[in-house]
Amino acid sequence: MIKQLELKLQPEEIDLPEILPTKSAEILHTDKQNISAVIPVRRSIDARGKNVFYRYLVDIYINEKPTNIVRKIDYRPVSNKNKVLIVGSGPGGLFAALRLIELGIKPIIIERGKDVQTRRRDIRAIQQEHIVNPDSNYCFGEGGAGTYSDGKLYTRSTKRGDIKKILDILVQHGAIEEIRIDSHPHIGSNKLPKIIATMRDNIINAGGEIHFNSCVTDFLLKGNKLLGVKVNDDEDFYGDSVILATGHSARDIYYLLHKKKISIEPKPFSMGVRIEHPQILINEIQYHSREKHPSLPSAMYQLSCNVDERGVYSFCMCPGGIIVPAATAPGEIVVNGMSLSKRNSPFANSGFVVEISEIEWKKYADHYPFAGLMLQQELEQKAFNLANNSQSAPAQRATDFVSGKISASLPKSSYIPGLTSAPLHTELPEFITSRLKTALKLFDKKMKGYFTEEAVLVGVESRTSSPLRIPRDKETFMHSEIKGLFPCGEGAGYAGGIVSAAIDGENCADAVKRFAAQN
């Protein structure tokens, strides 16, 4: 017999041996010896009341052994199979490659950046020397943007594909088992590189190929059929199809598509700042105590409101995290957030952004379809100028931002390149600042103490998603005009995080298989 129950555990009970079967036996009024196994299905923290506790949804096996329901994929050799090119080795590209191998197709990954280990040097250079390598940074390189900016796995894309399979694949490649059950699963930027490297090894061992330092500089077309890509202006790669999974910051690819008359279109996106608080303050607000129990993780939050017909919301919240420089070209500042696996930094940060639509980018309307992208660039370059042409990001205390004055001093921050006091309230566009000011006060009503002089705004958070979409057919996943081109993931405008991009990669791989069968 199998029963499913929800158990409530106090933080001090979490690490007690046999706590799950003991609690289960008490609730079911049965002898503990009758319980063969208790398998956690989902785990979350309930902090709505004065007392914080864990909720565990569990499957209880009574006098019955659990069946092994964990999938492990055997990636068989595909060396002599049909070839498919994948541009980009972020989650969309990597999961597309693994799925192609499952389907008996050889993937050839073309990656402009470096392997995950070598990439560390360029990330260190932007933090410590303020040097941006346009092909190797927090966004570009093996594993994509998620590798060194946190590895959060939460997604709302429950209807797009098999989330459980994505988590199982990550566990198979070295992720902790807990990601299968946590309501907001997280790996951490210190753990992800090894997982990404193991994925690479499986792809290569099965006969796939990965080419680093290989920037796509042209598309090889014959009529309306994409035959392959040119790399670094001098080497041609051909395949039966091309999965384009370049991420939301590969602006050169958008311009190349436009030059080749391959349609792209503008879409809404969001921009704003990073907001950073002392983590102990967020713990106090969320857990109702300044000293959290050792078994509780650093507290997180998720906030949203509507101001003047635009959504304002927290994005990519990093408890116990660090703000990182995520620029992809010299002369710009972009900030993002990340956490290590333990989430034990004394700071909490989150994107704090406003929805941007065609009304806001109308000043660049003559530059269709790049108006939104140009607005992004304008703010990123202005941030660089405000920081005296360095990666020392412009910043302002939240209270000073609302009252309209430059901060005489700034609080301590996790941002390694350092902060420069700047009047963000006048330097950001009014359609962003006015909404952020209102949202700060509204969020303080939801989380009393959120709006405080201890909070600092750091600019700019501009890469929440792509300002462009590469149109594709809803059924075939193929570009609406170019046969053999499968736009994929965040850069194509169809995903918003590691898991959703991974799902999209798998869906594109399945679509490639169907396309091959029909041709």
Image (cartoon, rainbow, N blue to C red):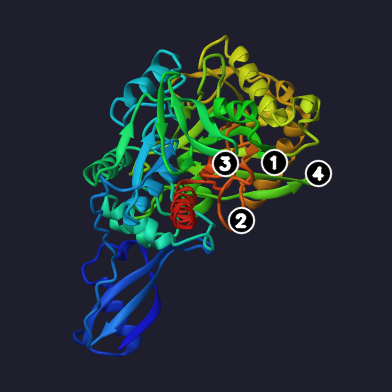
Mark 1, Cα crowd under 10 Å, few <14 / some 14-19 / many 20+, is: some
Percent coordinates x, y for residue 189 in the rendering: 36, 38
Q: Earlier in the sequence, mark 1 or mark 3?
A: 1
Q: Earlier in the sequence, mark 2 or mark 4?
A: 4
Please tell me which residue is depicted at 31% across the width and 30% down the height of the picture.
115
Mark 1 → mark 2, Cα distance in angstroms: 19 Å
Residue 433 vertical placement versus 150 (above, below): above
Percent coordinates x, y for residue 303 in the rendering: 61, 49
Mark 4 → mark 3, Cα distance in angstroms: 29 Å
From the image, tell me which residue sits under label 1: 268
Percent coordinates x, y for residue 71 in the rendering: 29, 64
State yes or no: discs 3 and 2 in contact (Cβ < 8 Å).
no
State yes or no: discs 4 and 3 in contact (Cβ < 8 Å).
no
Question: Viewer-nearest of labels 2 and 4?
Answer: 2
Please, what is the three-letter code of the amino acid marked with disc 1? Pro
Q: Which mark is residue 474?
A: 2
Q: Which mark is residue 492?
A: 3
Percent coordinates x, y for residue 128 in the rendering: 39, 16
Mark 2 → mark 4, Cα distance in angstroms: 32 Å
Please, what is the three-letter code of the amino acid marked with disc 3? Ala
Q: Which mark is residue 303?
A: none
Please, what is the three-letter code of the amino acid marked with disc 4? Asp
To which quarter of the image does residue 126 belong?
Answer: top left
Mark 4, Cα crowd under 10 Å, few <14 / some 14-19 / many 20+, is: few
The N terminus: image quadrant: bottom left
Mark 3, Cα crowd under 10 Å, few <14 / some 14-19 / many 20+, is: many
Residue 436 vertical placement versus 43 (above, below): above
Q: Secondary structure at mark 2?
A: loop
From the image, tell me which residue sits under label 4: 308
Mark 1 → mark 3, Cα distance in angstroms: 13 Å
